[in-house]
Image: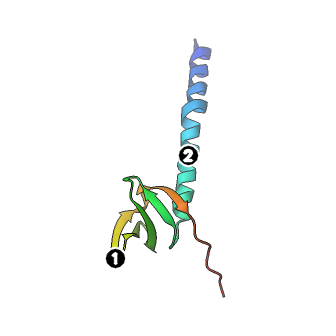
Amino acid sequence: MFFPLAMVFLIVYFMIIRPQSKRQKEHQSMIDGLRRGDTIVTQGGLIGKIAKVEESELQIDIAKDVRITIVRSMILTVRSKTEPAEKK
């Protein structure tokens, strides 16, 4: 009785829980690596360039003279990364 239940749990863990936590870690590392100048896509479908990075929010330019503030967790993907500035 215990063996089939354990097998079901293992299947659920390896098919659902583990891949989801892996995607979550990758998304968090992507968000932590954001910097000024990166082009991003939000979960709402807005495409913009990061103008200012704050602790929990980002300011992005979505058009000429149009800057909005969004929460970091709303970033879906990074379209293009900027090269890090050289430290002098």
Which quarter shows the C terminus?
Answer: bottom right
Query: In the picture, residue 52 is in which quadrant?
Result: bottom left
Instruction: Please identify the residue farthest to the front as the structure is shown.
Output: 64
7 left or right of 44? right
Where is residue 2? Give x, y as percent: 59, 15
Q: Position of residue 7 (x, y in %)?
A: 61, 20
User: Which amino acid, by three-letter code, is at mark 1?
Assistant: Asp
How packed mark 1 is, by other alpha carbons closer than 10 Å (few <14, some 14-19, many 20 or more), is: few
Secondary structure of the residue carrying numbered label 2: helix
Q: Is residue 53 visible?
A: no
Above or below: residue 75 compared with residue 1: below
| Contact check, label 2 and label 1, Cβ < 8 Å | no
Q: Which residue is painted at 39% across and 54% down in the image?
A: 45
Position of the N terminus by quadrant: top right
Read off the residue under disc 2.
23
Which residue type carries mark 2? Arg
Task: Tell me how many marks there are.
Answer: 2
- Estimate the x, y position of residue 69 in percent, counting from the top left: 35, 68
Q: Residues within 10 Å of mark 2 (few under 14, many from 20)?
A: few
* Mark 2 or 1, closer to the camera: 1
* Residue lying at 51% horizontally and 60% vertically, measured from the top left: 31
Which numbered disc flags the more N-terminal residue, 2 or 1?
2
Display colour scheme: rainbow
Q: Which residue is mark 1?
A: 65
Name the residue located 53 percent from the left edge and 53 percent from the top edge: 27
